[in-house]
């Protein structure tokens, strides 16, 4: 299924975006497409955090690049080095690895190109989504404590109902204002 998915993404990029893997700039174009269209990739790809040793190796390569570059090496203060050392230790302890028994993605249909669309079940993304809705709700206006509390309760209620419908398969009883 993963191989089939990779072929679908490759075919989509070739047909719809004009990507050609024979092009010497193929990886550069692919990287730029990912950088500027992250939500598309997040919706269509199951992205996992690498295992501890692989993750640590990648970070060590980044640190090596920073240390070898003439300008970037000047930014590698003792405080930054201590931060990287601490981060590396956490990686090696496995603190950032995905849990094997936790479902992180649910297939949510396919787009018009036949590519699968996934719901991500990583907590931080949903938390940031809720915080964005709360910030938009109140905006730059000052509201009283009771009004603010009521508005936040209503936003949380709507968010939870919508999440239950989309992520947990709860019955959608058709109240448009809950979407």
Image (tube, rainbow, N blue to C red):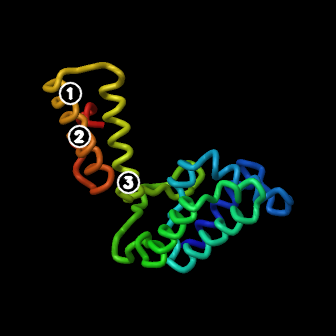
Q: Report the side of 88 relative to 173 (left or right).
A: right
In the image, residue 78 sits, relative to residue 43, either above or below, namely below
Instruction: Looking at the image, tell me whether mark 1 or mark 3 is earlier in sequence order.
Output: 3
Residue found at x 56% / y 74%: 56
User: How far from the left and from the top, in percent, is residue 66?
Assistant: 69, 62
Instruction: Looking at the image, tell me whether mark 1 or mark 2 is earlier in sequence order.
Output: 1
Q: Residues within 10 Å of mark 1 (few under 14, many from 20)?
A: some
Element class at badge 2: helix
Q: Report the side of 17 relative to 93 (left or right).
A: right
| Near-viewer residue (175 or 152) | 152
Residue denoted by label 3: 124
User: How far from the left and from the top, in percent, is residue 50?
Assistant: 52, 73
In the image, residue 155 sits, relative to residue 128, either above or below, namely above
Q: Residues within 10 Å of mark 3 (few under 14, many from 20)?
A: few
Residue found at x 27% / y 32%: 176
User: How much space separates mark 1 and mark 3, taking CA atoms?
Assistant: 24 Å
**Residue 88 visible somewhere in the drawing:** yes
Residue denoted by label 1: 148
In the image, residue 118 sits, relative to residue 3, either above or below, namely above
Cβ atoms under marks 2 and 3 closer than 8 Å: no
User: How far from the left and from the top, in percent, is residue 82?
Assistant: 52, 65
Cβ atoms under marks 1 and 3 closer than 8 Å: no
Count of numbered tags: 3
Circle on res. 156: 2
Residue found at x 39% / y 77%: 100
Q: To which quarter of the image does residue 9 belong?
A: bottom right
Q: Quadrant of the N terminus?
A: bottom right
């Amino acid at each position: 299924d993963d191989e089939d998915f990779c072929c679908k993404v490759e075919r989509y990029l070739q047909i719809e975006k004009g990507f050609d893997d024979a092009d010497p700039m193929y990886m550069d174009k692919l990287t730029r497409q990912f950088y500027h269209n992250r939500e598309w990739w997040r919706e269509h790809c199951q992205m996992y955090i690498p295992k501890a040793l692989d993750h640590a190796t990648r970070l060590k390569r980044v640190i090596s690049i920073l240390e070898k570059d003439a300008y970037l090496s000047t930014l590698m203060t003792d405080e930054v080095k201590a931060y990287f050392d601490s981060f590396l230790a956490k990686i090696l302890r496995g603190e950032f690895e995905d849990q094997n028994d936790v479902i992180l993605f649910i297939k949510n249909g396919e787009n018009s190109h036949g590519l699968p669309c996934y719901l991500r079940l990583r907590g931080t993304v949903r938390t940031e989504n809720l915080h964005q809705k709360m910030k938009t709700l109140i905006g730059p206006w000052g509201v009283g404590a009771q009004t603010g509390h009521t508005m936040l309760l209503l936003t949380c209620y709507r968010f939870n109902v919508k999440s239950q419908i989309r992520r947990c398969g709860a019955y959608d009883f058709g109240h448009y204002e809950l979407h």
